[in-house]
Amino acid sequence: MIRSVQNSIGESKTQLFICPDDITAIRLKVKLSQLGLNSNISLKVPPYSEETNILIENIALEVQNHAFDIVWIGIGTPKQDQIATRLSSCYSHSTFICIGAALEFYTDLKPEANRALQKLGLEWFFRLMTEPRRLFRRYFFYSLPGLF
């Protein structure tokens, strides 16, 4: 992800990172600043809401007012997917990229699965073990039925 950011900044693209919370946004800002990657980058923490339409409206205002080239959405599935789908149809000048927990991994707020588990395709299992209350329903009631 950061390599993509570095490449796109080199092209003077304006970018917006949609962060899941203030702590992630602050840590991301520090890390990007340390790398000299803070030009052309904005961070946004949308208000928490179970209502996806509220999130979409909030982010849409930001995209509309600043005409970002790239919008990185890291607030989790399925909300980030719904937001990207809806906004990409309205703002064709922007590219919307769903990155899930990548911001939290990059800022060391969540542990990443080790390479062996990643290579075996078991990163989802590691995440389930580290956040069972939050991810059980998503994995087994929302994602699993979609596979069949």
Image: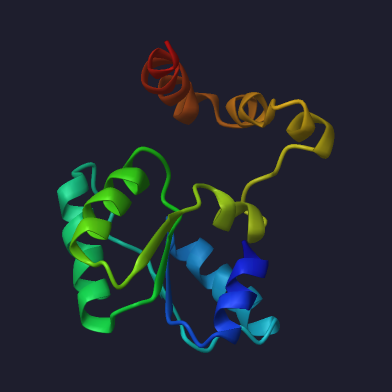
The residue most toward the front is 92
Q: In percent of the image, x 22 and y 52: which residue is there?
A: 86
Quadrant the N terminus occupies:
bottom right
The residue most toward the top is 148
The residue most toward the right is 116
Q: In percent of the image, x 28 and y 49: which residue is there?
A: 85
Q: In percent of the image, x 44 and y 16: which residue is there?
A: 147
- 78 relative position to 130: left or right: left
- 56 relative position to 106: left or right: left
Residue 94 position, x and y percent, is 33, 70
Residue 130 position, x and y percent, is 63, 31
Quadrant the C terminus occupies:
top left
Q: 5 or 106, which lies in front?
A: 5
Color theme of the render = rainbow
Residue 95 position, x and y percent, is 38, 65
Asked if 49 appears above or below 70 in the picture, the reply is above
Determine which quarter of the picture holds residue 90.
Answer: bottom left
Asked if 62 appears above or below 116 in the picture, the reply is below
Asked if 81 appears above or below 37 in the picture, the reply is above
Q: 84 or 34, which lies in front?
A: 84
Residue 135 position, x and y percent, is 48, 28
Determine which quarter of the picture holds residue 125.
Answer: top right
Q: In percent of the image, x 25 and y 74: which residue is there?
A: 62
